[in-house]
């Protein structure tokens, strides 16, 4: 594949991701962002944004990072043009786990033997019970 063909594939992928972001990624209480809103939020010109949406142009990394930041998605989204929804979903799940303290708990438990892990599970179960919560739903067999 020539450099020209490679660039076209890249431009097409960027265009596909940008069209997805413009159509699907917005606050729940409103509809999609306008081109003007997205351009202003990402600090790019509206003409640049329109060109990228149409598969033209050669954006800088900074432009793609600004767009990702505006839409609150990981910059990795530009690497997976065929499936931006999955990239965004994985990112949001990871962020939710971090925000909820789940990652912090998991990191603290690293290296514990089976008895230590059992103690952690019982402690969490007791904390849930003390707060009136039912048993944790893990969907996983954590004892293996």
Image (cartoon, grey):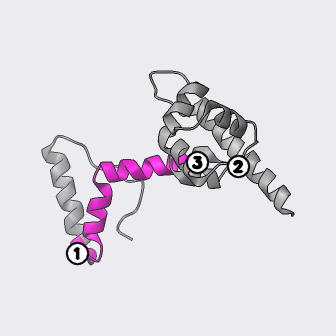
Is 38 positioned to the left or the right of 59 in the image? left
Q: Which residue is mark 1?
A: 115
Of tags 2 and 3, the one toward the viewer is 2
Determine which of the numbered discs, if any, sits on residue 57 in the image. none
Foreground pick, 107 / 16: 16
Find disc 3 in the rendering and name its residue.
64
Q: Give the residue drawn at x 22%, y 42%.
A: 133
Residue 125 location in percent, x, y?
Answer: 21, 54
- Crowding at label 2, few (<14), some or many (≥20) Cα neighbours within 10 Å? some
- Give the side of residue 51 with respect to residue 70, left or right: right
How dense is the environment of label 1, judged by Cα within 10 Å: few (below 14), some, or many (20 and up)? few
> Which element carries disc 3, helix, strand or loop?
helix
- Which residue is found at the position 19% from the left and 67% from the top? 119
Q: Is residue 10 magenta?
A: no
Percent position (x, y) of residue 61?
Answer: 58, 54
Q: Which residues are magenta?
A: 88-116
Query: Which one is closest to the eye, mark 3 or mark 1?
Result: 3
State which mark lies toward you, 2 or 1. 2
Magenta part, dominant SS: helix
Q: Where is mark 2, residue-wise? A: 58
- Residue neighbourhood size for the residue with mark 3, other residues' Cα within 10 Å, grouped as few (<14), some (14–19), many (≥20): some
Q: Quadrant of residue 107?
A: bottom left
């Amino acid at each position: 594949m020539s450099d020209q063909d490679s660039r076209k594939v890249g431009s097409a992928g960027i265009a596909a991701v940008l069209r997805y972001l413009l159509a699907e990624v917005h606050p729940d209480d409103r509809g999609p962002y306008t081109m003007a809103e997205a351009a202003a939020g990402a600090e790019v010109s509206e003409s640049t944004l329109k060109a990228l949406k149409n598969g033209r142009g050669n954006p800088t990394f900074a432009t793609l990072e600004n767009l990702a930041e505006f839409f609150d998605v990981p910059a990795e989204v530009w690497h997976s043009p065929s499936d931006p929804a999955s990239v965004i979903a994985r990112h949001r799940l990871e962020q939710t786990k971090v925000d909820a303290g789940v990652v912090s708990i998991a990191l603290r438990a690293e290296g514990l033997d089976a008895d230590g892990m059992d103690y952690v599970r019982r402690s969490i179960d007791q904390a849930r019970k003390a707060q009136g919560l039912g048993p944790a739903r893990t969907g996983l067999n954590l004892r293996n």
